[in-house]
């Protein structure tokens, strides 16, 4: 299908990949690991990559179970430069709307494709650069910031290229929005361009792409939407002595770690079925302990009276 080939936003749900025009690997030794933990994961992603939103349950579980052994280095990949970069492909955002609704069902994560009809984005570069600016302040808060802008675009149909939304997400996640704006307009652009160059050098051709690297620079790769076991296996192949931690999988324990959880995420992390998860989450909502945001393709739940 020509549209699918030419537009990276039309992610293939079967491979779980949002693919960009093929990049040629130019330097396999580009990464010199300076890792603090046995496994460094270099994660090439994009704020509007639906497949990346799809693996949030797997990544969150990986952090809970193997957080003592892994560190994740988030890199931006540049999924959508603009709408004219492929003259023979899709020329309008509205073609993406139905596709996002389809992959939402496939990944079982809430995505509302109507943003491409109501308030379409012209590029994924502004929120990507904003993320690099967030990283300059605080790595942990930057990851929370990325989560927040993804919730904005996938669930709330907010155009996250607009500064009003970027600024709001920064404030909500404890970042200095004024400093973010300054860095966004200066140094963060260079950091973003460096990420694009690194992606090119490592042969990244779509998202999500995760390289699992040991202290000797040996690599395992997970490409696209995959079940949790593939992420776990990549950790264990990279570092066979990795130890799994038993974490608190009660509802309160999970929401204290991750203040917002989609139904699929709660199910994955708690080890309960999707149906049982929904029943419990609704009960907690009725009791005033959680708030529920409903989209046409699923729900996300937020703990009440908790900072992100």
Image (cartoon, rainbow, N blue to C red):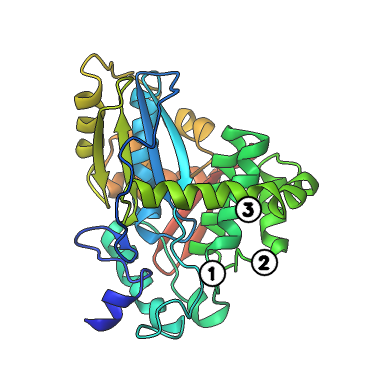
Asked if residue 70 is positioned above or below residue 298 in the image, the reply reads: above
Q: Residue at x 64, y 43 (%)?
A: 134
Judge from the rendering whether residue 92 lies leftward or rightward of residue 149; answer left or right.
left
Is 46 left or right of 272, judged from the image as shown?
right
Q: Quadrant of residue 212?
A: top left
Residue that label 1 marks: 123
Q: Which residue is mark 2?
A: 162
User: Looking at this view, is 125 or 54 the one in front?
Assistant: 125
Marker disc for residue 189: 3
Indicate the position of residue 205 as horizontal and vertical percent values.
Answer: 31, 57
Q: Is residue 97 shown above or below 147?
A: below
State the residue in front, 127 or 215: 215
**Viewport quadrant of the N terminus:** bottom left
Q: Please report contact status of discs 2 and 3: CB closer than 8 Å, yes or no.
A: no
Gap between marks 1 and 2, in whole Å? 11 Å
Specify which label sits upstream in the sequence, 1 or 3: 1
Q: Residues within 10 Å of mark 3 (few under 14, many from 20)?
A: some
Mark nearest the camera among 1 and 2 is 1
């Amino acid at each position: 299908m020509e549209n699918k080939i030419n537009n990276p936003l039309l992610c293939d749900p079967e491979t779980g990949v949002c693919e960009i025009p093929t990049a040629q690997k130019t330097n396999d030794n580009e990464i010199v690991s300076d890792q603090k933990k046995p496994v460094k994961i270099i994660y090439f992603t994009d704020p509007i990559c639906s497949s990346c939103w799809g693996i949030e349950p797997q990544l969150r579980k990986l952090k809970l179970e193997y957080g003592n052994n892994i560190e994740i280095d988030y890199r931006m990949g540049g999924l959508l430069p603009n709408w004219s970069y492929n003259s023979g492909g899709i020329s309008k955002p509205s073609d993406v709307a139905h596709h996002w609704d389809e992959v939402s069902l496939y990944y079982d994560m809430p995505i509302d494709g109507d943003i491409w009809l109501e308030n379409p984005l012209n590029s994924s570069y502004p929120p990507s650069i904003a993320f690099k600016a967030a990283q300059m302040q605080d790595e942990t808060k930057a990851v929370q910031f990325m989560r927040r802008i993804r919730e904005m675009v996938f669930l709330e149909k907010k155009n996250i290229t607009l500064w009003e939304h970027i600024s709001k997400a920064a404030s909500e996640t404890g970042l200095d929005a004024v400093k973010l704006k300054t860095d966004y307009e200066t140094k963060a652009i260079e950091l973003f361009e460096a990420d694009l160059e690194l992606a090119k050098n490592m042969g990244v051709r779509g998202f999500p792409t995760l390289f699992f690297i040991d202290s000797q620079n040996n690599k395992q790769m997970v490409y696209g939407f995959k079940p949790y076991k593939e992420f776990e296996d990549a950790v264990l192949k990279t570092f066979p002595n990795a130890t799994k931690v038993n974490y608190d999988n009660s509802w309160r324990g999970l929401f204290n770690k991750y203040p917002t959880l989609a139904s699929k995420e709660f199910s994955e992390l708690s080890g309960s079925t999707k149906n049982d998860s929904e029943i419990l989450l609704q009960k907690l909502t009725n009791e005033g302990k959680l708030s529920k945001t409903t989209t046409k393709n699923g729900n996300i739940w937020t703990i009440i009276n908790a900072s992100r």
